[in-house]
Amino acid sequence: MSATLSALLSALTVAAALVLGGPAATARGGEPGGDSGSNWGRDSAGVSPPVPPVPAVPAVPAIGRVWPVGSRPSVVRGWEPPATAYGRGHRGVDLTAAPGTPVRTVAPGRVSFAGRVAGRGVVSVELTGTGDPPLRTTYEPVRATVEKGAVVAAGETVGVLEPVGSHCPASCLHWGLRRADTYLDPLSLLPPWLLSRGPSRLLPVTGVPQPKAKPDAAALSLSPRPSRSPQGASCIDPDRC
């Protein structure tokens, strides 16, 4: 009877050791009976599971074809993304422009808003083919000349710059870009050739010989023509022939 009891106790001991992690009873941290946390999150082979990648914000396609105002306006203030959702920053760029300047959409899309916000005129355009949710560019202070829902092409005028409501020292257009609630740099919409293009200038041409002047046809028609005498000889003065 004692032998049977001893065998039963031995079997229970082995089972308990297997449940508790083996006869050594070593904890995850490598110290018996302790847990330093050095193997926290690892599987039985000591290998850490793969960490899921953080979803990246899709890159902004350079689909712009024109500047919102002018041909190459000066940037009064650039894009300064805030450190937090409610932090200070500049969620767009400011471009110099005079009041009354036509404001154009930089890429094709659909007008998603045209009205006033906090006393300022605002026009927003959802850009075509820029994903879901789509990119949305905004222009202010602008007196809209389009309505919500209108389909606009790149370079099409959507309003004129208002003389009031600007936060610049002088008149300027505030141009913004968002994807859902994420603010992006609107200048990234413009391709390099458009960012670096300046106003056209005519330069002097040197080292090229000037073409010879051709006689004026009207002067040739008025110049005396040689006439012939009755004897057939040419003469310059018709009175002497």
Image (spheres, rainbow, N blue to C red):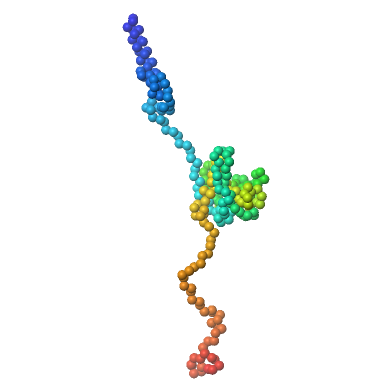
Residue at the (62%, 49%) spot, across then down:
168
Image position of 106 with respect to 208: above or below: above
Could you say where residue 198 lies in the image, as x and y percent from the top left? 53, 57
Camera-side residue of 145 and 214: 214
In the image shown, does 84 or 226 lie closer to the viewer?
84
- Report which quarter residue 112 is drawn in: top right
Q: Is residue 56 above or below residue 101?
A: above
Question: In the image, residue 193 lies at what x, y percent?
Answer: 49, 54
The residue positioned farthest toward the bottom in the image shown: 231
Q: Which residue is found at the position 40% from the left and 30% from the top? A: 48
Q: Position of residue 67 (x, y in %)?
A: 56, 53
Q: Is residue 111 visible?
A: no
For image coordinates 55% across by 38% down, the residue present is 84
Q: What x and y, as percent, mark residue 218?
A: 56, 80
Task: Give 205 or 230, whichever is nearer the viewer.
Answer: 205
Return the residue found at the far left. Answer: 3
- Compared to residue 53, the image places residue 211 above or below, namely below
Work out whether residue 229 can be spotted: yes
